[in-house]
Amino acid sequence: MDGSRGNLEDEFYAEYREDTKCTGRPGRMDIVGGTIAKSGMRSEADGVKRLGNIVDLRSDTVTRPTGEMRRAMAEAEVGDDVYGEDPTVNRLEKRAAEIFDKQAALFVPTGCMGNLIAIKVWTHHGDEVICDERSHVNLYELASMSAIAGCMPRIARGVDGILSWKLIEAAIRPKIYYDSQTALISIENTHNMAGGTVHPTASVDEICGHAHEAKLKVHMDGARIFNAAAALGESVAQMTRKVDSVMFCLSKGLGAPVGSMIVGSHAFIERARIYRKMFGGGMRQAGVIAAAGLIALEKSPARLHVDHENARHLAEGVARLPGLKIDPANVRSNIVIFDCEGTGMTAVELCDVLREKGIWALDTEVYSVRFVTHCDVHRAGIERALAVLAEVLAEPRTARA
């Protein structure tokens, strides 16, 4: 490394530390040993002791591929997907379209890219996208709808993240030449920051009916749509039959190591393929990862009810602990978000203490902590998380300082 590059990197890291005030919180980005690393994923060499019995409840993105997935990846039949010649990718796309009863599908590297592609297809620069104020497309996708697609979010305040046509209608811009125009409605199902709440299908159908009458498109950010389907006891095809496009993740509840899908009409996917390439998502022998996605798509939905049962059990246990607030009846899927203000600790402080004891969680607001259940955490892990949480809350406040 030459001296000038070293100086630039030193300046970057110094500025990063100053801007972010890195504290080593679970799920946060920290500078470790001259590289950017994810908190909670560092080795002993980085100065953080790895515990042998960690219960990682930060997200359902942390799962490891199964042995069956690894074998399928090793043996995958591949080709150049940019040329449309990867047979495993083609099978995955065909199967995804069939399951959603849509005309076509496209394999993309990430859910963020999938949502961005859909927004780009359905909008023009200067348009607005109606979405819930705490939606993923608004909060956690680096303002890509503005920076890349040239759109602005038009915020509606859903009830527990759930939008109704009445709320959406109030946010639609009038057809006046000096106003930016509404082009798209984005619905998140399940809703992450609202605690995994589920959009009723009748409500989605009503939104789509009115939106289409108003010549608006509807996109569903269905990162966890299969969790929503498990909660409702419905098929994803039934739940999304009227929406214009859907993005869903293979790498969340379904347990694949990487990848997401977008589904819709042939015309939508033809344009989406162009933007995937433009945004850097054109992959070559992608069948290696699509093979794991196929297994996740075919086999994982059938076990999601287990994650939901574990989440409800976790929520019921949390509700019995002093200083914590949650209504277990509101836990519909695999996300558990509780209030910890009554403990005298902030969410960051509580997550830090839990992490030291091998329970990894995520702070979402000043006093809100999130647990997410998934296929790599079984009932025994849930019980351990509750036991450690109870132990932490029983400690005198001075002992924790």
Image: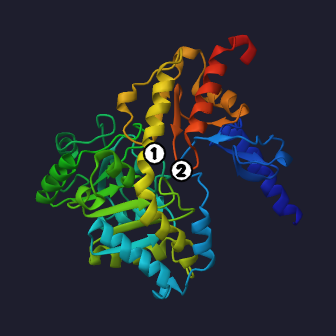
Q: Which residue is mark 2?
A: 375
Q: Nearer the viewer, residue 157 or 350?
A: 350
Residue 206 lies, in percent from the top left, at 15, 50
Residue 33 higher or lower than 263, as above or below: above
Q: Quadrant of residue 401?
A: top right
View extreme (left): residue: 213
| Alpha carbons under labels 1 and 2: distance apart | 8 Å
Residue found 13% across the figure and 55% down from its top:
209
In this rendering, does residue 176 appear at all?
A: no
Residue found 69% across the figure and 34% down from its top:
355
Amino acid type assigned to the residue bearing label 1 in the image = Val
Quadrant holding the N terminus? bottom right
Residue 284 higher or lower than 359, as above or below: below
Mark 1 and mark 2 residues within 8 Å of each other at the beta carbon: yes
Q: Quadrant of residue 116?
A: bottom left
Q: Quadrant of residue 362?
A: top right
Residue found 13% across the figure and 53% down from its top:
210
Residue 352 lies, in percent from the top left, at 68, 30
Left or right: residue 241 versus residue 160 is left
Q: Residues within 10 Å of mark 1 (few under 14, many from 20)?
A: some
Residue 77 higher or lower than 398, as above or below: below
Q: Which residue is mark 1?
A: 306
Residue found 58% across the figure and 67% down from its top:
68
Amino acid type assigned to the residue bearing label 2 in the image = Cys
Q: Nearer the viewer, residue 233 or 124?
A: 233
The residue tagged with tag 1: helix, strand or loop? Answer: helix
